[in-house]
Amino acid sequence: PRNVKLAVIPGDGIGPEVVAEAEKVLAAATAGSDVVFDTTHFSLGAARYLETGDTLTDADLEAIAAHDAILLGAVGGVPGDARLKDANIERGLLLKLRFELDHYVNLRPSKLYPGVPGPLADPGAIDFVVVREGTEGPYVGNGGSIRRGTPHEVANETSVNTAYGIERVVRYAFDLAERRREKITLVHKTNVLVHAGGMWQRIVDAVASEHPDVAVDYLHVDAATIFMVTNPGRFDVIVTDNLFGDILTDLAGAVTGGIGLAASGNINPDGAFPSMFEPVHGSAPDIAGQQKADPTAAILSVALLLDHLGMQDEADRVTQAVEADIAERDGSTRTTTQIGDAIAVRLQA
Ligand code: NAD
Ligand code: IPM
Ligand code: MN
């Protein structure tokens, strides 16, 4: 049998609750296959920091990097918690993993499943993928401030954009579009961010010339938020910068039935490092520990993980089990565990 080393980072808040269900579904989906998952749990996040003072040590990173794939729940404490001010769990843990493991494609599919009550009166068919750049942009963290504590404080956050970094994610997006409905929308803010935006546009144009079958268009990010609500069916593949992609994908989650359904993969397409799969949502401190979290996003992230590992049949079975479960949701409130159990049971049948 093939052995897959899986690192699991449950994290904080609802992270451990949804990851427990995702692991349950992973086990059900792969029982009887010739792949054996050898799973290691890593205790990382705000809780670990408060206990030990560690965010992500070099030893943690090295151990995680030695796995074939990573499943992550969510990390981060209550926004504004003063005890976490110096920890910066998001930067020091989540973004550090994405950057160190060169997850340059942040893949965020959005699909409106039949039967899902969304907020749009007449949504039409929604099925698009946001290819969010994952290692550059304003997330790089270059910046600083001076005169802090005075009325003259100056704070800078520099957006770092490289031709190399843009080209590799744009190429990935075009290859994906070739396998889908052959349409790409570049989303940026080229009217204001002329330097970075101009480079994105030029690179998209250049790569587009190698893909004459793919229709390419462009939207400013503000207009993109309008169309995501008024005509989400117009999108197939969206390629965009790290920060715009972050914002657009929470909106995309909302229009396709809620953030509790939105899955993602932080992909290193070259395979030099393990890719990491996680729900788009965060640790949701407002509902943590109450069994109120929807584990579907984490479970669909398992489908992305299986697909990435070449286990298409198992991935499809997970997606189908989720679809079947969603179709029968009638607004009744089930616990996190009940939803996970119901999906896992479908996979055993
Ligand atoms: P959030 O996504 O945690 O929560 C936003 C809202 O969505 C909340 O009302 C929450 O209850 C709801 N929600 C989220 N997931 C849900 C689910 N599965 N089922 C039902 N409802 C759900 O965003 P936030 O409040 O901005 O952030 C909370 C913490 O999580 C912060 O520390 C933030 O930095 C962190 N965060 C981490 C990740 C990650 O680990 N990938 C992602 C986003 C935010
Ligand atoms: C996400 C999150 C992260 C991001 C934060 C927690 C750093 O919002 O995964 O979407 O901005 O990428
Ligand atoms: Mn986000």
Image (spheres, rainbow, N blue to C red):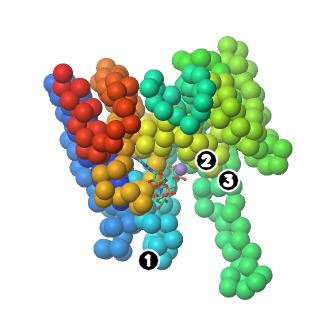
Q: Which image quarter is the C terminus in?
A: top left
User: Under tag 1, what secondary structure?
Assistant: helix
Say whether residue 303 is left or right of residue 201: left
**Residue type at tag 2:** Ile
Mark 3 vs 1: CB contact within 8 A: no
From the top left corner, tell me how far across and down residue 33 is, in percent. 19, 24
Determine which quarter of the picture holds residue 121: top right
Residue 344 relative to residue 205: left or right? left
Horizontal side of residue 249 vs 76, given as left or right: right
The residue identified by callout 1 is 83
Amino acid under disc 3: Val
Label 2 near ligand 3 (CB < 8 Å) = yes
Which image quadrant: the N terminus?
Answer: top left
Which numbered marker is on residue 160? 3
Q: Secondary structure at mark 2?
A: helix
Q: Is residue 30 visible?
A: no
Nearest to N terminus: mark 3 or mark 1? 1
- Direction bottom: furthest residue: 150
- For residue 247, the mark is 2
**Residues at badges 2 and 1 in contact (C-beta under 8 Å)?**
no
